[in-house]
């Protein structure tokens, strides 16, 4: 597994990554988000949102396993979060459920942070569902601290998210 390279997303893989993200959402957010909403996620809607993020300057890195299946992804780029206009955003980080706790998430986060630092960002930021305690603990272990909260309206339901930030490391 440690030999699996992290690679940039090819342009023709947006649909594949979108389906993968929806699968990850259905696993990670079961019990957190509305089950009807999760059951009705579509690849087309997700792909449209991903393409907009890419058009706005985001990048996606992926890890594939030995069978060329997606093992993990991270999306990162300029922040859209209020008060963090000059920060680099880790917008998504997902690891296939059977590979959680294998170090892939750590590798993806390090790769995203390194790419953001190369772009000159002096701070990293992300938002995470407040009820997703597993992800919050993961980010805390990687130096992120809660700096605020926000709410998202998803299909008529209001969800609280924690905003977490981390300063970049300077050499």
Image: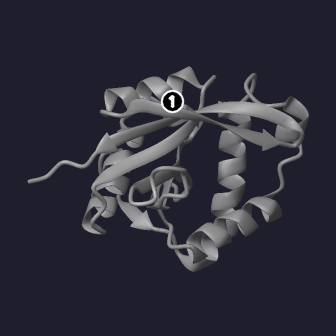
Toward which corner of the image does residue 61 lie, by quadrant?
Answer: bottom left
- Decide which of 111, 3 is in the foreground and name it: 111
Number of numbered discs visible in the structure rendering: 1
What is the residue that sits farthest to the left in this orientation?
171
Vertical side of 134 occupied by 111: above or below: below
Q: Indicate the secondary structure of the residue bearing disc 1.
A: helix
Query: Residue 42: x percent and y percent?
Result: 83, 55
Which quadrant is the C terminus positioned in? bottom left
Colour pattern = one colour
Q: Residues within 10 Å of mark 1 (few under 14, many from 20)?
A: some
Q: Is residue 4 visible?
A: no
- Decide which of 144, 85 is in the foreground and name it: 85
In the displayed structure image, the side of residue 164 where residue 162 appears, left or right = right
- Decide which of 150, 68 is in the foreground and name it: 150
Give the labeled residue for mark 1: 135
Query: Going 65% across and 41% down the picture, which residue do you hit?
Result: 24
Query: Residue 45: x percent and y percent?
Result: 81, 61
Query: Going 49% across and 58% down the picture, which residue do you hit?
Result: 79
Vertical side of 153 occupied by 44: above or below: below
Query: Residue 97: x percent and y percent?
Result: 58, 34
Query: Going 48% across and 27% down the picture, which residue do you hit?
Result: 136
Which quadrant is the N terminus positioned in? top left
Toward which corner of the image does residue 19 lie, by quadrant?
Answer: bottom right
Query: Going 48% across and 44% down the picture, which residue do you hit?
Result: 126
In the displayed structure image, the side of residue 171 where residue 4 appears, left or right = right
């Amino acid at each position: 597994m440690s030999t699996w390279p992290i690679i940039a997303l090819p342009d023709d893989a947006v649909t594949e990554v979108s389906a993968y993200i929806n699968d990850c959402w259905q696993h990670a957010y079961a019990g957190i988000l509305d089950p009807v909403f999760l059951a009705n996620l579509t690849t087309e809607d997700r792909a449209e949102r991903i393409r907009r993020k890419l058009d706005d300057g985001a990048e996606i890195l992926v890890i594939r396993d030995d069978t060329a299946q997606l093992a993990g992804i991270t999306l990162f780029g300029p922040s859209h979060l209020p008060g963090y206009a000059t920060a680099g955003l880790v917008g998504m980080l997902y690891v296939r459920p059977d590979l959680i706790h294998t170090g892939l998430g750590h590798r993806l986060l390090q790769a995203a942070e390194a790419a953001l630092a190369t772009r000159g960002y002096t701070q990293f930021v992300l938002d995470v569902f407040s009820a997703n305690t597993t992800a919050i603990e993961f980010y805390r272990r990687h130096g992120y601290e809660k700096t605020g909260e926000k709410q998202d309206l998803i299909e008529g339901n209001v969800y609280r998210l924690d905003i977490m930030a981390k300063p970049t490391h300077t050499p």
